[in-house]
Image: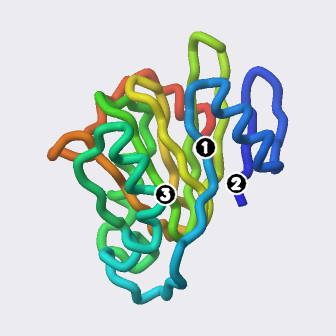
Amino acid sequence: MAILTILDPIKKVISDPAEIKTYMNARGIVFEQWKASIPLNDSDSQERILEAYDHELGPYMKKHGYINADVINVHKETPNIEMIRAKFLSEHTHAEDEVRFFVDGEGQFFFHLSEREEVFKLLCEKGDFISVPKGYKHWFDLAPKYHVKAIRVFQTPEGWVANYTNTGTEQKYKT
C-alpha cells in the first residue's frame, strides 16, 4: 500500500489510497492501484507478468500512445546495484511521461514541484501504478529494500532517458 509523505512546506503523511490519488491527481500525476487478472509467482516471465496486467495496461497504452512495455527486476543481488541506484537519485526530468506499475517490491518517487513550492515523496508498492508527466522534476530511490519489480512503458524506442537538473535539491532530502 502506498504512503505519501509531504516534506515541504509542511510535513504530513497520508496512507489512505483515495486521499493519495486525490493529492497526486490534483498535481497532474496519475496514481491508481491495479490487480492482476491471473495469479503470479516470483519466477514468472516478463510475458506472463505483462499478460496478467494487460486488462489495465493495454487500454492505458493505447489511449496514451505507448509503443512498448517491459519488466525490470532489481534486487540486492543485482550486479552494480549501487551504480543503478545512483543514476536515479539525482533530480531529473524526462521528455516523455515516466510510467511505472509495481508488480513487487517497493521504491520511492520524490517530487519537486517548484511552482507550488512543494516537495513530497510517494512510496510505491505492489499494485501501485504511477504516471509522472514529462518535464516534472523528480528522483527515485529503491532503498532501503533494494527490490523493485515493475512494468515500464515508453512512447519512444529509446526508453528511459534522464535530463538531470543539477540543482542539488535532492541532497536536502536524502535519507
Picture coordinates of residue 90, whole percent (x, y)? 42, 37
Query: Whole-Å distance between the Cαs marked 1 and 2?
Result: 10 Å
The residue closer to the viewer here, 153 or 116, is 153
**Res. 19 visible in picture:** yes
> In the drawing, does residue 104 fall left or right of residue 17?
left
Where is the N terminus found, in terms of image quarters?
bottom right
Q: Which amino acid does label 1 sit on?
A: Phe
The relative height of residue 164 versus residue 73 in the rendered view (above or below) is: above
Residue at the disc numbered 1: 31
The relative height of residue 91 versus residue 158 in the rendered view (above or below) is: above
Q: What residue type is labelled 3?
A: Glu
- Do the residues bearing badges 3 and 1 touch, measured as CB atoms within 8 Å? no
The disc, 3 or 1, on the residue closer to the chain's N-terminal end is 1
Residue depicted at 39% across the width and 85% down the height? 44
Query: Whole-Å distance between the Cαs marked 3 and 1?
Result: 13 Å
Using the image, tell me which numbered label, if any, was put on residue 39: none
Which image quarter: residue 10? top right
The residue closer to the viewer here, 16 or 172, is 16
Q: Single out the mark in the foreground, 3 or 1.
A: 3
Indicate the secondary structure of the residue bearing disc 1. strand
The residue closer to the viewer here, 141 or 130, is 130
> In the drawing, does residue 153 fall left or right of residue 24?
left
The relative height of residue 67 versus residue 22 in the rendered view (above or below) is: below
Residue at the disc numbered 3: 56
